[in-house]
């Protein structure tokens, strides 16, 4: 085996790890266990069954608690955009992504998305979270406070999660206190352009009861002098859990975000009074039981929002649903998961020209996923979902996967999956392009990946994929109308590496290189990123680099809902930070963003800020 008879290159990596470990403070046996777990975390997002990442056919990225805690940002998608290859998020300033029109906060994954249509499904504790009327994600709603870890599927996962999971899935796992006692964390700080933050987290565990509560407030005047780019946001989250017995647990998770966002407009046409007041809230009640038949899960969930905009738009929306599944192991090496989802989404709205009636749409779906271990090194899997939409009927969503463990430190995998996106209520009923006869967007994705571990200090992963989209909803005229006629094809390569010589240092790097269709915007053909953290004595130094190359922006200033595509300049941004404990739970941190004062745009027409700083004081007890 490789670990028993390492060749010269492996010996060199091991020697480098021991050297760095000795310089920075060393690790004990517990640290070695943590290193092993880091390279092969336990995840549920890909199959709804807890399992090791190396046993999954899907491409998975896990952002662990230490990366969230030491990132220096409170915005989920800023962090995910740096850590996840193939994921890009448009931005316009220090805080606040925006919610309407050509606003920032548009997600794309492997070329899917980039505009108002949502092709990346966001989950909170496994439940879908998107706007019921527009079908879009409100990026400012998602705050890292109260988030334990972030799990990401790169590629379609509609066979498990249904609509909007065409490009990928991002699941936010709520923070829990797993040990008896109580803990409190407070962070307060400020920085450039009157940016201010205050965050409080408190949780505990007593007997069968555990809970964790967060409250935070973030504000900024914004960096644009020609337009108002201010932002004010308050976020709340609550997790509570109760263990009825060793086999049965019930938990409740709630979130609320109250935001006022100002769109500064393009630099050629700045705006002072483009404001958006948004309130988003939701929750889930989850019952889990582990018995002789396996794992049973039942979840009731809801997501709500109200939007009030400067141009007269006002809307209320909701998404209600039930999710349930049963996991069994009928014989050795076999796992069977069978589930059923039901949801209803919609709402009502008005604008300066019309008062729209309430629209609601129902979808439901049974699904099944099978996984079989053959011998000790081969895992085959298959899944099927039958999604029913009350307007266009049934959608068949298959998935197949193969995992080969050539050695204990080398894995090869293959997968094929179909994804879809239901047309939003906006596309079906709102404004002149609306078309009530629309069907879903459809994609097929094929990919192959290989993972190699070298010792316990280095992990390498490479993935090649090919995604084909058909029946895509596009704008045509005359007459102006949304129709299902678009197609595209994207091929790409993703590379990830993690170097962790010990608990005192870690570096991760990723790259995505894609051959994009000419119609794709807000997605770079090349994205390179590096993140690192180093513990020296009691201080933690962090750094990150993001390089974006070969991409197109979108200009929506014309009369058509379809944008004019604009070639964008490449850019590189470097951030660095320092976290220093002072005395018994009291600490200080300093974050420098855009260290080299690069002039760039992360979306067309919106210049990003130059070098900025953020400092904070933290207290934990």
Image (tube, rainbow, N blue to C red):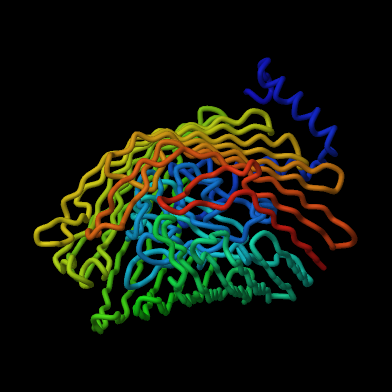
Is any atom of residue 330 visible in this view? no
Residues 382 and 530: in front is 530
- Residue placed furthest toward the top: 8
* Picture residue at 36% right of the left edge, 80% below the top: 314
Q: Is residue 283 above or below residue 142?
A: below
* Picture residue at 27% right of the left edge, 66% below the top: 424
Residues 591 and 390: in front is 591
- Residue placed furthest toward the left: 478
Give the image location of residue 556, x and y in percent. 31, 57
Give the tally of numbered discs. Answer: 0
> Could you tell me which quadrant the C terminus lies in?
bottom right
In the rendered image, which quarter is residue 321 located in?
Answer: bottom left
* Picture residue at 42% right of the left edge, 65% below the top: 325
* Picture residue at 81% right of the left edge, 28% below the top: 19
Left or right: residue 111 compared with residue 207? left
Residues 583 and 549: in front is 549
> Could you tell me which quadrant the N terminus lies in?
top right
Is any atom of residue 442 visible in this view? yes
Give the image location of residue 300, x and y in percent. 44, 76
Left or right: residue 233 compared with residue 56? right
Give the image location of residue 206, x and y in percent. 74, 76
Left or right: residue 135 compared with residue 528? left
In the rendered image, which quarter is residue 290 located in?
Answer: bottom right
Q: Is residue 168 above or below residue 528?
A: below
Give the image location of residue 533, x and y in percent. 71, 43
């Amino acid at each position: 085996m490789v670990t028993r008879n390492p060749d010269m290159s492996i010996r060199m990596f091991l020697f480098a790890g021991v050297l760095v470990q000795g310089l920075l403070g060393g690790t004990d046996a517990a640290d070695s266990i943590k290193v092993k777990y880091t390279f092969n975390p336990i995840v549920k997002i890909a199959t709804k069954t807890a399992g090791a990442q190396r046993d999954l056919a899907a491409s998975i990225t896990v952002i662990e608690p230490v990366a969230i805690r030491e990132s220096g940002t409170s915005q989920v998608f800023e962090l995910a955009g740096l850590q996840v290859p193939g994921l890009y998020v448009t931005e316009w300033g220090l805080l606040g992504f925006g919610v309407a029109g050509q606003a920032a906060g548009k997600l794309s994954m492997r070329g899917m998305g980039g505009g108002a249509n949502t092709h990346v499904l966001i989950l909170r504790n496994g439940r879908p979270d998107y706007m019921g009327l527009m079908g879009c994600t409100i990026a400012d709603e998602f705050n890292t406070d109260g988030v334990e870890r972030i799990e990401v599927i790169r590629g379609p996962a509609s066979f498990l999660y249904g609509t909007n999971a065409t490009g990928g899935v991002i699941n936010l796992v709520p923070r829990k206190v797993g040990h008896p006692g109580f803990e409190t964390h407070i962070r307060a700080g400020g920085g450039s352009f009157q940016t201010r933050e205050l965050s409080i987290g408190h949780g505990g565990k007593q007997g069968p009861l555990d809970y964790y509560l967060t409250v935070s407030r973030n504000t900024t005047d914004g960096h644009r002098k020609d337009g108002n780019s201010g932002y004010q946001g308050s976020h709340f989250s609550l997790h509570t859990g109760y263990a009825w017995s060793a086999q049965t647990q019930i938990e409740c998770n709630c979130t609320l975000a109250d935001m006022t966002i100002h769109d500064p407009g393009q630099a050629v046409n700045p705006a002072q009074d483009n404001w958006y007041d948004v309130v988003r809230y939701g929750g889930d009640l989850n019952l889990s039981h582990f018995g002789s038949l396996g794992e049973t899960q039942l979840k009731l969930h809801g997501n709500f929002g109200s939007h009030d905009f400067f141009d007269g738009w006002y809307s209320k929306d909701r998404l209600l649903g039930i999710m349930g599944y049963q996991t069994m192991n009928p014989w050795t090496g076999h796992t069977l998961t069978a589930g059923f989802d039901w949801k209803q989404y919609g709402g009502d709205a008005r604008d300066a020209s019309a008062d729209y009636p309430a629209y609601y749409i129902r979808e439901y779906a049974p699904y099944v996923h099978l996984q079989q271990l053959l011998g000790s090194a081969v895992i085959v899997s298959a899944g099927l979902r039958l999604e029913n939409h009350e307007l266009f009927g049934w959608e068949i969503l298959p998935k197949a996967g193969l995992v080969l463990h050539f050695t204990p430190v080398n894995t090869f995998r293959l997968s094929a999956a179909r994804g879809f996106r239901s047309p939003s209520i906006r596309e079906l009923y709102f404004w002149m392009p609306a078309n009530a006869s629309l069907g879903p967007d459809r994609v097929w994705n094929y990919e192959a990946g290989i993972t190699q571990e070298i010792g316990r200090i280095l992990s390498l992963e490479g993935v090649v994929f090919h995604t084909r989209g058909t029946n895509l909803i596009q704008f045509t005229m005359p007459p102006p109308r949304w129709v299902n006629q678009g197609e595209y094809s994207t091929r790409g390569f993703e590379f990830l590496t993690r170097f962790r010589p010990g608990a005192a240092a870690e570096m991760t790097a990723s790259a995505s290189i894609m051959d994009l269709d000419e119609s794709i915007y807000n997605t770079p053909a090349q994205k390179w990123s590096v993140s690192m953290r180093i513990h020296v004595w009691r201080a933690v130094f962090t750094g990150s680099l993001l390089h974006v190359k070969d991409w197109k922006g979108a200009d929506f200033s014309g009369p058509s809902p379809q944008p004019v595509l604009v070639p964008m300049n490449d850019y590189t941004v470097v951030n660095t930070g320092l976290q220093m404990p002072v005395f018994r739970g009291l600490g200080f941190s300093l974050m420098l963003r855009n260290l080299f004062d690069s002039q760039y745009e992360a979306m067309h027409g919106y210049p990003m800020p130059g070098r900025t700083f953020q400092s904070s004081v933290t207290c934990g007890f």
